[in-house]
Image (cartoon, helix red, strand yellow):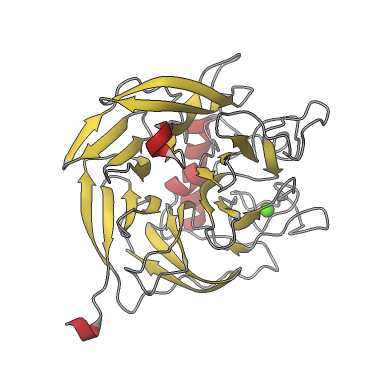
């Protein structure tokens, strides 16, 4: 019976998308808690993340949001928040104001207004970077676009187009797209495989299934790995990715780390390195949603292994390396949102080793993004709720 229910939900998801390759997020969205989850033969399912000894309390800071995809903090500690539907909000002094002049988004499936991030020297430059799905260019549908703009009196001005992936497609899945900066003047952003795993991720002459690296003005760094290769998309930094919706700049190692959605099973954490191939779909720890096999291989000499993978998939979104002293239990560890299981996963980290995994805020809702604020508090974006603050646990001694 469970299997029948699952199949029915998958047929619905499939017909809704009009596609023959299912989307991790959308298929996961239609899944119910009591379904069976299949795992590839020979691969062990991991234990679930454990319940914490004491869970964190949280309080809603910004309410009235539907799908808050991302948020960031301006120097005055007010907040910019993207709604996937295409609205950008400025939350200041307890009020949420809509910002005008935001580029039109191609709102379909997982597409919409995606990440928002500030230039590393925002105070002197005023640049705000945004990713979103856009209909710009030839052909029906859309693809992921990166722009930068300035904010004046709740209006976006001086918009500069920095990158637009092609071709457009009416497929609704796997747009990416997170933005991070390193300390050497580069911007990294992700574009998912756009539901075309057979053509995009392994081909450096095509967009999709990639991490991109640009200079902050959108120009291509001369030392990007595929500069000068025939027909290459020279903005590509690494490839063979499926759909990364979480990315960090690791402040201790100076590396870019991401997590990406697997198919059924096989979500991954990867350390992003120049010019390397992360394997999708040639190697994966996952299988198709109909339980059929994508590949028998989980790795190979030409592919970079994940640092960590999840079986079953948690549908990860949002990623933080905690530096704040406000949460001694979390400091130096990773936090990842789970869309599918609706909690915040705490992964204990020792170098590149993942230790104990704990479920925080269990049942809070589809957890879309997580950030550490300039005030040292952890904030999370939860669908249907808004932005919440994780309240530090008081030490016994101070009670
Ligand atoms: Ca991989």
Q: Percent position (x, y) of residue 244?
A: 56, 46
Q: Percent position (x, y) of residue 357?
A: 47, 71
Q: Is residue 102 above or below residue 371?
A: above
Q: Percent position (x, y) of residue 118?
A: 42, 39
Residue extending furthest toward the front: 124
Q: Percent position (x, y) of residue 94?
A: 16, 42
Q: Is residue 326 left or right of residue 30?
A: left
- What is the quadrant of the C terminus in the image? bottom left
Q: Is residue 392 left or right of residue 38?
A: left
Total numbered labels placed on residues in the image: 0
Residue extending furthest toward the top: 138
In front here: 340 or 212?
A: 212
Residue at 83%, 58% (x, y): give it. 301
In front here: 318 or 250?
A: 250
Which quadrant holds residue 237?
Answer: top right
Residue at 46%, 38% (x, y): give it. 119
Residue at 61%, 27% (x, y): give it. 165
Asked if residue 113 shows in the view, the reply is: no
Asked if residue 282 shows in the view, the reply is: yes
Q: Is residue 63 above or below residue 168?
A: below
């Amino acid at each position: 019976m469970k299997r029948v229910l699952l199949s029915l939900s998958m047929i619905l998801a499939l017909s809704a998308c009009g596609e023959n390759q299912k989307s991790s997020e959308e298929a996961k969205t239609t899944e119910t808690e009591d379904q069976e989850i299949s795992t590839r033969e020979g691969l062990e399912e991991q234990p679930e993340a454990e319940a914490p000894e004491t869970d964190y309390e949280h309080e809603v800071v910004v309410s009235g949001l539907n799908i808050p995809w991302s948020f960031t903090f301006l120097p005055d500690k007010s907040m910019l928040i993207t709604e996937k539907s295409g609205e950008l909000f400025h939350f200041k002094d307890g009020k949420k104001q809509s910002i005008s002049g935001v580029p039109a988004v191609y709102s379909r499936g997982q597409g919409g207004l995606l990440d928002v991030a500030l230039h590393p020297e925002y105070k002197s430059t005023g640049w705000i970077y945004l990713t979103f799905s856009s209909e710009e260019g030839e052909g029906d549908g859309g693809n992921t676009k990166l722009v930068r703009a300035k904010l004046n009196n709740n209006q976006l001005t001086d918009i500069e187009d920095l990158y637009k992936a092609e071709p457009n497609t009416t497929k609704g899945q796997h747009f990416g797209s997170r933005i991070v900066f390193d300390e050497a003047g580069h911007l990294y952003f992700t574009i998912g495989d756009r539901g075309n795993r057979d053509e995009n991720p392994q081909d450096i002459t095509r967009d999709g299934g990639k991490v991109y690296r640009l200079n902050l003005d959108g120009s291509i760094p001369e030392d990007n790995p595929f500069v000068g290769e025939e027909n290459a998309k020279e903005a590509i930094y690494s490839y063979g990715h499926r759909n990364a919706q979480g990315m960090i700049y690791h402040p201790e190692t100076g590396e870019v780390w991401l997590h990406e959605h697997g198919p059924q099973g096989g979500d991954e954490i990867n350390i992003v390195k120049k010019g390397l191939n992360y394997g999708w779909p040639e190697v994966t720890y996952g299988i198709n949603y109909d339980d059929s096999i994508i590949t028998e291989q989980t790795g190979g000499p030409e592919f970079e292994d994940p640092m960590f993978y999840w079986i079953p998939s948690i549908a990860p979104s949002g990623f933080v390396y905690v530096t704040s002293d406000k949460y001694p239990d979390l400091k130096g560890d990773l936090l990842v949102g789970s869309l599918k299981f609706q909690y915040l996963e705490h992964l204990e980290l020792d170098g590149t080793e993942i230790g104990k995994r704990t479920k925080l805020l269990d049942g809070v809702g589809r957890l879309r993004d997580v950030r550490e604020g300039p005030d040292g508090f952890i904030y999370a974006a939860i669908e249907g709720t808004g932005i919440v603050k994780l309240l530090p646990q008081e030490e016994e001694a101070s009670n």
